[in-house]
Amino acid sequence: MSTKETDSKTLVGFSFASGRSLPALSAKDLQAARALLDQDDPVINDAILPSELRVNGRPKPILSDFASTEINHKHLDSRPGNTSKTVVKCGFSCASGRSLPAPSTEALEKAYNLVNNQSFAIAKDMIDDKNMGDRIRARKRSFIDANMQEINTKTPSMKRITTKIVNTEDYPQRTHPKNVGGNSYVCQSRKSLDRLHPCSLQTASKLLPKTFAPPSEAKRKLSLFNLNSLPQPRVKLKDFVKTLPLSFSENELCNLGLLQEIINMTPSSSSCFQFTMSEIDPSLPHEKRTWGARELLAELIRLGAEPGSIDERWVKNHYRWIVWKIASMIRCFPNEFQNWWCIEKVLEQLRYRYEREYNLAQRSILKRIIERDSPATYPMVLCISDIFIEDSAIIDTTPDVYYGIELTDCWYKIRAYIDQPLQRAILKSKLRIGSKLEICGAKLIGESEAVPALEVPSSLRLKLSANATRLARWDARLGSKNLQAYSLLRSISPDGGFVPAIDVIIIRKYPMLYREITADGNVVVRNAKEEEEARRKHEEANALFVQKIIDGYKDEQSKSGQYRTVGDNMRRRLSLKDIKDESTVEELYEIMQSGIEMTNIVEYLSGERRKLFDDFVRVKEQERMDHLQDRISKSLEEANKSRSVTPFFKVRICDYQMSKKEAREATLTIWQPDELLYDTIKEGNRYKVYSVTTANHQSYPLDHHALLRLSSTGRSTRWMEAPIDPNMLQSSRYIPRCIMLCDNLWGLNQKDELDLVVLILVILNETVSERDSTACTRIRKIMVVDKSKQMALIEIRGDRYNVLLEKSIVAIKNLQYCAYDAKYNVHFFTTTVETEFKTKPSEAYLQYAISELKQWLECNISIASTLELTASRICREC
């Protein structure tokens, strides 16, 4: 086989990714390609650096032929083997054109060695080596490290200069909390860049900002505690001790061999406690054989803590809580923690706190709250460190003893105000020093500005609500915590204030009501129809009042106009003839005020004067209207004609999660709701309601039949509908609405609510019940009966329901049961503000009950007549 045939079979050309071949190359194309490959490339032969080299990460620009020739010529003349020792004039020049000093022969030789050896070695690796990227980076790093080492050895003052750059005491530092190792540079760059050529650090230090330092030279914060050595996840105290905390008497603790200082340790005595070092020479003075906060501060600084970041106050504060915590753990678990009573354990705890607070910039929950960086409403677990009696000058609400508490997260402390239920808990010894509390919805009162956590004044306090505070588990970790604080209704104290969240079922939803506070301070509650009528009457009264003001203003204006015309009658009679001679718009306006129409005046004016007159009249009329509006507003304000009306509605609720004890119901008042919320809430649905409070004026304890009253906290109250289990709904206190018959009311308790559909037999005369000397209530009674032929007497309070007629059928919702009269065989009911009377209801169950009662009346007309006579006789006898 010939060479030509071999080439034609070997060089078959290219193909697509799918495998389909491209058209074969012709013999002419192959010959042209061989000629190109065989000839020499003058650019590659003459270049000093390969074209693939990059400068500062970017491709090097292509040089012109003239520039390449000049560079090669100067490069060849500067080689060591060149016989000519003349230094070629090269280098850089200033912007003015003046040349900079030429480099010496030694510098040129060194530059040649660096460029020639390194660059061509890199170029060869780029062409021959398959792993050229790794080799280039390795060679570059070794090259830079070698030159950097050479520069550092030749510049003895570099260490001093670098120290000056990274001086952290002269310039503000920025901490990096997420740096686990605790090492953070003064300024960290986003990406570390490899330098291709070494440069003078002295020159670079002048260009860099004062807070910048190279990562390799920056001053790092020294870590005093290795957080990575802690077990992950952290071992819980319950799992470590594997038992409940034990309660020992003082004698029992002494018999166990505990020191008296451990038994009697309190948060107040722990701050001044000092360890006695038994291993120190007994001949030394006592102050040198003890170890306390001052010695621990010196030890922390010796270990590497920054003296400017901590002081004796910081160490004394944390030393106090560490010593008290260790002593308390030893008292509860003597066998597990007795060996912790040593200065080494205290120092270890201090190093851990320094690492967290200063190196990692992590603050405890109380420190963040005191410094106003976190809201006090966060759920958290705190410990009672002290119980004290409040000064009578601070608390004037009660003559009795009033307690206050001091809370701590075992890092910092703050005092707290507590309400009456928590006061009772202290008196019953349910709250003691060392008790842990789950707190939610606290308020920070006192100072308006942030203060240091070590300088908390006594006026800066937390305010706790009993309903948002509960005892925590003995092994609960102190600090912020995600708490699922759904309170049961039976656990809510009526005077306990804020309630974080409740999980309830809507038993009943009542109609929208409107609460008005009148000018004399009385409170009037109306339903929707009554509010519409009251609003209409108020608008009519205001319209009459405003009309009187307008009429009076017009009378004043007319009188003032008559007075002006009497003094100048002759001029006003001739004013129309003399209009053209008038020179000012003010005089024309006076003529118009005398009774002449404006259109008659405008007819005699030219275009320019007409425009001036129109503008002047418009301004005067606007001033007159503004003056009238100000008078009306002022008169309405003085007469107190505005209304203060607040819409609200109530729901009756029960707990979704059933408790072992007797369940409780409550009423929740939603103030200023929107229509969407009212339409969204449905009876029989489950809702999680966040941020409610107990209503005012509720006594403790509640009466047996009294309902707990809750109230929304405005727009901060949130509603979230939740899925409901049918079994849970069936076992709850929710009963769907239905119509009850009057002969099936046995067993009802007083104030129980029910719905009726009845026939009105007799309407009694209206009476007035005087509640006090300033208020009275109108009362109207009606005798009704349903298809069970059982009669009932309903007492209607207020001015509503005047449209009721005898022998009419009406549906009544939310009627309240009172009693049963055995003499006349009559049940007694009364109405409330939530009671509704409907003749044409929209509810299906009411419509069905009305149709059934109508059918019964059609079939029992004689019975209905007899019942009507009986009702009239009972009313006469009563």
Image: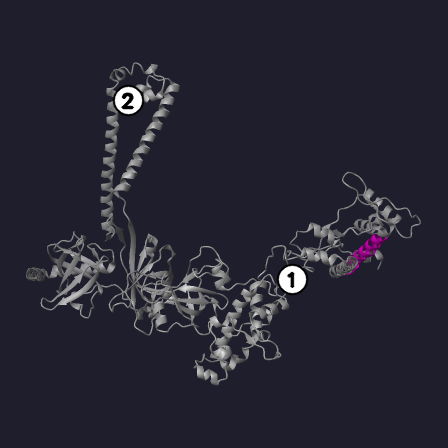
Q: Which residues are magenta?
A: 109-130
Applied colour scheme? one colour
Q: Residues within 10 Å of mark 2 (few under 14, many from 20)?
A: few
Magenta-drawn stretch contains 541: no
Above or below, 706 against 552 in this view is: below
From the image, tell me which residue sits under label 1. Answer: 220
Q: Is residue 122 magenta?
A: yes
Query: What secondary structure characterizes most of the magenta part?
Result: helix
Q: Amino acid at mark 1?
A: Arg
Quadrant of the rendering where the C terminus is positioned:
bottom left
Q: Where is residue 19 shown, x and y percent of the image?
A: 68, 58
Report how far apart the C-alphas of labels 2 and 1 lie in the structure: 92 Å
Query: Residue 354, how many percent across, how many down?
Result: 57, 66
Q: Residue furthest right?
A: 83
- Residue 590 placement: quadrant: top left
Residue pictured at 11% horizontal, 67% vertical: 825
Residues marked 2 and 1 touching at CB (< 8 Å):
no
In this view, the residue in front, 293 or 137, is 293
Q: Which residue is mark 2?
A: 597
Horizontal side of 820 relative to 4 (left or right) equals: left
Q: Secondary structure at mark 1?
A: loop
State left or right for residue 262 relative to residue 442: right
| Furthest residue in direction bottom, as rendered | 255
Q: Is residue 195 left or right of residue 833?
A: right
Give coordinates of residue 763: x percent, y percent: 11, 56
Q: Is residue 715 above or below residue 402?
A: above
Q: How many marks?
A: 2
Q: For the residue marked with disc 2, what is the amino acid?
A: Glu
Crowding near the residue tagged with mark 1, few <14, some 14–19, many ≥20 C-alpha atoms within 10 Å: some
Asked whether residue 656 appears in the rendered view, the answer is no
Question: SS for tag 2?
Answer: loop
| The N terminus lies in quadrant | bottom right
